[in-house]
Image (spheres, rainbow, N blue to C red):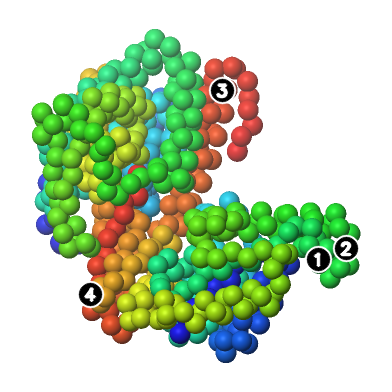
Amino acid sequence: MLSVLKRSPELTVLVLLAVAGYAFMGIFSHVTGTEVLSATSVWGIVFGSFLLSTAIAIVAVIAGIGGGVLFTPVVMAFTSMDTLIVRSTGLVVAMFSGLVSSGPFMKKGLADIRLVFFASVPVVVGAISGSFGAIFLSAYMGPAGDGIVRLLLGLILVFIAFMFILGGAKTEYPQPKKIDNLSRTLGLRGSYFEESMGQRIDYQVTKALPGIVLFFLVGFTGGFFGLGGGWAVVPVLNLVMTTPLKVSAACSGVLLALGNSCAIWPYIMYGALLPVFVAPWMIGQVVGGILGAHILSKIKAGIVRNILIAILLLTSVKLIARGAETLMGVNIPVF
Amino acid sequence: MAIVTISRGSYTRGREVAEKLTERMNYELVSREVLIEASEHFNVSEIKLERALHNPLSVLDRFTNGKRRYFAYIENAILNHMIKNNMVYHGLTGHALIPKVNHLLRVRIRAEMEDRVARESERENISKDEARYLLSKDDEERRKWSINVTGHDPCDPSQYDIIFNASKTHVEDIVDIIASILQKDYMQNDSESQKMLEDLAKASEIKASLINQFPSVEVHVQGGTAIIRVQGSLEQEEYLKRSVREQMPTIRGIQDVRVSVIPWIG
């Protein structure tokens, strides 16, 4: 435990501050209920969110699936929470998944900083645009907007689940057929030491321009739906831009942290991010991440991943059904 | 000192060829034995192994990796026989196990459909139409199975060194031809070929011991180095490496173990 605290001091401070904040609120502040929520139920939601977040983080760590991909669809499908609040909280969950892994990847030299800087521009622009799009849709279309979001998210989730099943046709060490001028001018190349081969792997990135367009779309999807984008960033870097798989996965973590932290701002400005609800989700991600790493030694990660993929598919059915119900005004009896 | 793998469909007389060749060359005949050995060594019922070797992969198998696990056990048992040399293996996938070994002769025995239909109809006492349907179904299932498990179509001629049509050539003549090839100098075992075979056997031993915990494991052994690749979360790379090393069996001749984590998309 002490080693984990030493490894991520900034996260530890953040978690301790949040816990201290809640303790302060609990002891010194008089929490009153509203017409909708009693004081007890507020604490129940806070504590329940923490437990749920911890559980999601545990399975996410074991199965290697981003917390945001699990959180947003599941909460949006099975609860009646406002979709904007769910999405903004989902972005916090996804951001923390990325933040936890960013430090080790940077220290190891696996995350290519030049490539991250290059990709982060379209990702951040896309993410902020996506967030504004989500707020616009919610403000001008109301419940119909929520229906559209649920329906689209359900369809995206089907796509993500099948990508996880098929493995995304990834290539460990892709070779570029032709290097474009923009990639060459920007010096998008690098190397890392592959321990298993006992040698340095040099790589050259290509197709910078299609990369920019795709990263914008990835960022937009992430910001709009409150999803992490690891499932999309890795294939873009690996299959389109010929980055080695390990570098792609490492860069993906850092890019998620960057993109999602920017995408949160429009939600904050709109008042769709409630700190009192977000904090337990944030703490749960850190605690669950630590617990998940310990549990990993006792169970088969592949089986957990397959179960999660099945849950994602079931969630997508529910989302599509709820979206269709809202848009068409019919009742679809799905579990 | 050679190895012969005979790939065959049902009722192609491949088994007959294998038995007569074994007798002629005084080799060891291996087929079902691998199932019994794998069953005892890895504590899995023989019926499950038999199903893994003959039934096509279902959608559920792709999720549970059950059949891939059983196939890894069977593969290990086959390779443990092969390193002893002087053997004839007949059954599925023998030809696909060893890609480039000098003293291996990969044989495919085929026969005309009408001959096979007549033989099955007579033996099973069923109509010719029924026999034709069953044979076509069996051929297609084997083909799909082979593509799924080995990545190769068993009907692809490039998978074999020699192909016989048992409807045209007599079994005795096929045995004569194979036996005469096995006497040639180029079919004799050399140290390089043997080394490659032993490395494959060691890799299969490691794979079989790890596949239960790491279903996607791939193992490559060269000299005294074992390179093990497992799929997993890149964040958990250090743990996965440690876990693989802890669960790996001690194998004589392996001095260096290198583990690589192939990241999951997440």
Specify the quadrant of the image occupied by residue B88.
bottom right
What is the distance, in whole Å, between disc 3 and disc 1 at their CAs?
55 Å
- Quadrant where the C terminus of chain B is found in the figure: top left
Of labels 3 and 2, the one closer to you: 2
Q: Amino acid at mark 4?
A: Asp
Report the residue at 59% width, 17% height from top: A328
Of labels 1 and 2, the one closer to you: 1
Name the secondary structure under disc 1.
helix
Q: Position of residue B177 (x, y in %)?
A: 59, 75
Q: Which residue is mark 3?
A: A324
Q: Amino acid at mark 2?
A: Ile
**Chain of the residue under label 1:** B
Q: Are marks 3 and 2 on the same chain?
A: no
Q: Which residue is mark 1?
A: B120
Above or below residue A69? Residue B159 is: below
Which disc is residue B256 wearing? Answer: 4
What is the distance, in whole Å, between disc 1 and disc 4 at their CAs?
52 Å
